Amino acid sequence: MKKPAATFRFAPLLPSLLLAACAAGPAPTPPDPALPADFHYAGGWQRADAAPPEAAGPWWGPYGDPALDRLLRDVAEANATLAQAEARHRQALTQIDAARAGAWPNVEGSLGHTRSGGSAPGTRLYEARLQIGWTPDLWGRVALAAEAADADAGAAEASLAAARLALQITAAQGYVRLRTLDLHDALFARALTAYERSLQLTRRQYEAGLVARADVIQAETQLQSVRTQRLAAARQRMLEENALALLAGRTPAQLRLERRDASLPAVPATPAQVPAALLVRRPDVAAAERQMAAANARIGIARRAWLPTLDVGAAGALQGGRWRELVDAPARVWSLGPSLAALLFDGGARRAEELRTQALYDEQAQVWRASVLQAVRETEDALASLQSLAEQDAQQRRLVALAEENERVVTYRYEAGEVTFLEVASAQALALSSQRSALDVEAERLLASMQLIAALGGDWRPAP
């Protein structure tokens, strides 16, 4: 029995149409991000299941330092690396419009002139043509392409936020180190005053025949040692200030942070309960999630490559032997009609592309999972550091008090002639060293609090 003509005409498309049912397939399942039920350190610091609180202001607000506020705002506005990330975000945004443009018809116009000839006299043909083509998005290819582009733009935006946070954290930590060096310089200045007084006392006692020349040399050596240390600290401060100028998008001559002897900002209190959703909100984790979403959309595009495409076109032209005939009495030509096309055999190219996009999704899914685990690890590190440094700070302050009391007692005994200057020098060196260590521990606590803020994506303050 003879088949109907229509059935015979579309018979080659049947394999593609039969694949339509399985082209989309189920969405891939992302891996478990392994969020902790609680955290090991900081006295059982608990995860809360509520949504993360809205930030009441910039994350550095609780430190209450106007100079730090100005510096970090400059980083956000003028840093060159951040400007590059912002440009990449704008590039990604343009790809969304480019992808959505595929759902609209294409309109083309042309104006041409041709000559032809042979043994017979040649002819001229002038033509003005307008052509319209449209490919309806029957299977959602364009929608998926736009979805992938939107996810890419979201990843670029999250990467921009991650870069901003990382640069501001780096600048804030550099600022803390710089202010710590200022306090070290103040310690050195006080020590120099005390050591010069000890040297004068020792010289008078030597001139009176009460002590040996070795005591004078010991006092001079100690004084010179502190002078050398102070110069080294001053050089380090200049390098820190130059690094901050670069982060703020300025030259070193354009950024000057005046020396300040005021104490470092207090470490903000860590809340007892913070939402675990803060970990997933981290910009780098959000960027990984958006990249995974883009890879998932591209799997759908690859699966729909098996499906046929429907093109609808219309064209019209005006023709004549001379330019003016296009207006006066042109020959009109037009065409209109749809076409359905499908690739029946490609040697496995479409299957390979589908497997490639699936592997890309698997890779991005593991990148996302790894970023979550890294966020948990960094949070645990910061909590452990804060817990340990709080105890160390208390012990170090006790050590400073003992070292200062020991210095006073030994100095009185030396003035009374009961001990040599070697004991005074040892007591003074211990006091200075313990005071400098106390400053360093205090600075480390500030840095650890900033690391915790970075680990949680930029804020951990409870809702007001």
Image (cartoon, rainbow, N blue to C red):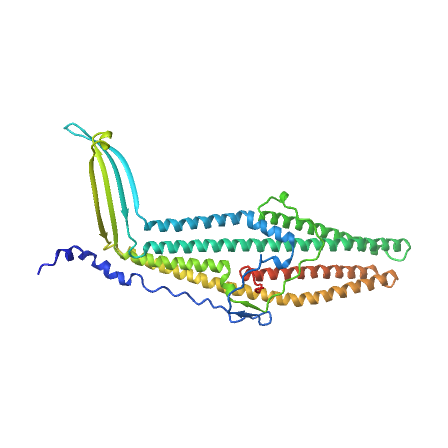
Where does the image place residue 16, in percent across and percent down from the top left? 24, 58
Quadrant of residue 300 within the rendered picture: bottom left
Residue nearer the viewer, 89 or 295:
89
Q: Quadrant of the image for the N terminus?
A: bottom left
Q: In the image, what residue occupies the spot 55% across and 55% down?
A: 166
Q: In the image, what residue occupies the spot 26% across and 60% down?
A: 20
Residue nearer the viewer, 19 or 361:
19
Task: Looking at this view, name the residue that lies furthest to the left.
Answer: 1
Task: Looking at this view, name the residue that lies furthest to the top.
Answer: 121
Q: Quadrant of the image for the C terminus?
A: bottom right
Where does the image place residue 73, in percent across and percent down from the top left? 58, 51
Could one spot residue 361 in this view of the protein?
yes
How many marks the image carries: the answer is: 0
Where does the image place residue 211, in percent across and percent down from the top left? 87, 57
33 w.r.t. 135: above or below:
below
Residue nearer the viewer, 187 or 157:
157
Q: Is residue 10 left or right of residue 232?
A: left
Task: Looking at this view, name the residue that lies furthest to the right.
Answer: 208
Could one spot residue 225 in this view of the protein?
no
Q: Is residue 331 left or right of residue 162?
A: left
Quadrant of residue 54 within the rendered picture: bottom right
Q: Is residue 304 left or right of residue 411?
A: left
Where does the image place residue 103, in percent across and percent down from the top left? 32, 51
Q: In the image, what residue occupies the spot 59% across and 60% down?
A: 450
